[in-house]
Structure formats: structure tokens, C-alpha cells
Image: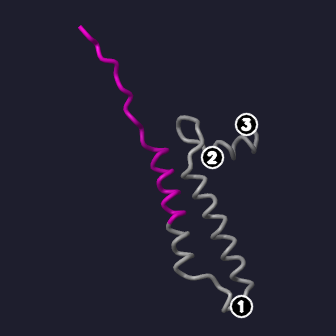
Amino acid sequence: MNFKQWIIDLFKDERGSTSIKPVIAFIGTLFLCGTMTANSFSEEHFKPSDELVNAVMIITAIGMGADSLDKFSTKKKDEPKIEE
């Protein structure tokens, strides 16, 4: 497995299809890191709203948490019904 395939597999669920939760969490993380980096080099009156930063942080945390729960939860398989 190469690095590219490993990155693609990070965004897949247990069935092998792409899941939106890790994608949203990754994009939110990128925005938070970019905002914090830009904020450290800008003047005080250019800083982003605290509520906006907190909202992105909450959405990112929920996305990461929901994806983590999906990885560890197992679904019961439907057992075939025997008809008489």
C-alpha cells in the first residue's frame, strides 16, 4: 500500500465507500489551522470572530467523533429467515 492509497482509505467507511464525515472533519481541520496561522501573523482588528472559530471547531470535532464511533461500532447482520 502506498501513501496515496493510505490517504484515500482514511476517507472510506467500513463498507469501502467514501464517507462524508471524515471529509468534513479534514476540511474543518484545514480551515482551523489556516485561520489560526493567519491570525498569528495579522493585526488584532483582522482576527476572525470567536464564535465562527468555535463553530468550525465544534463541527470538526463532531465529524471526527462520529467517524470514530462508526469505525468501532459493528452492525448485526440479518440472519436469513427459514420459512416452513
The location of residue 54, given as percent across then percent down, is 52, 75
Residue at the spot x=46%, y=44% of the render?
72
- At label 3, the amino acid type is Met
Residue at the spot x=42%, y=42% of the render?
73
Observer-nearest of 75 and 24: 24
| Label 3 with label 1: CB-CB less than 8 Å | no
Crowd class of label 1 (few under 14; some 14 to 19; many from 20; radius 10 Å): few
The location of residue 65, given as percent across then percent down, is 48, 56
Numbered range of the magenta stretch: 59-84
Which residue in the structure is indicated by mark 3?
Answer: 1
Which quadrant holds the N terminus?
A: top right
- At label 1, the amino acid type is Glu
| Label 2 with label 3: CB-CB less than 8 Å | no
Which quadrant holds the C terminus?
A: top left
Which residue in the structure is indicated by mark 1?
Answer: 43
Q: Earlier in the sequence, mark 2 or mark 3?
A: 3
Residue at the spot x=61%, y=46% of the render?
11
**5 inside magenta stretch:** no
For label 2, the SS is helix
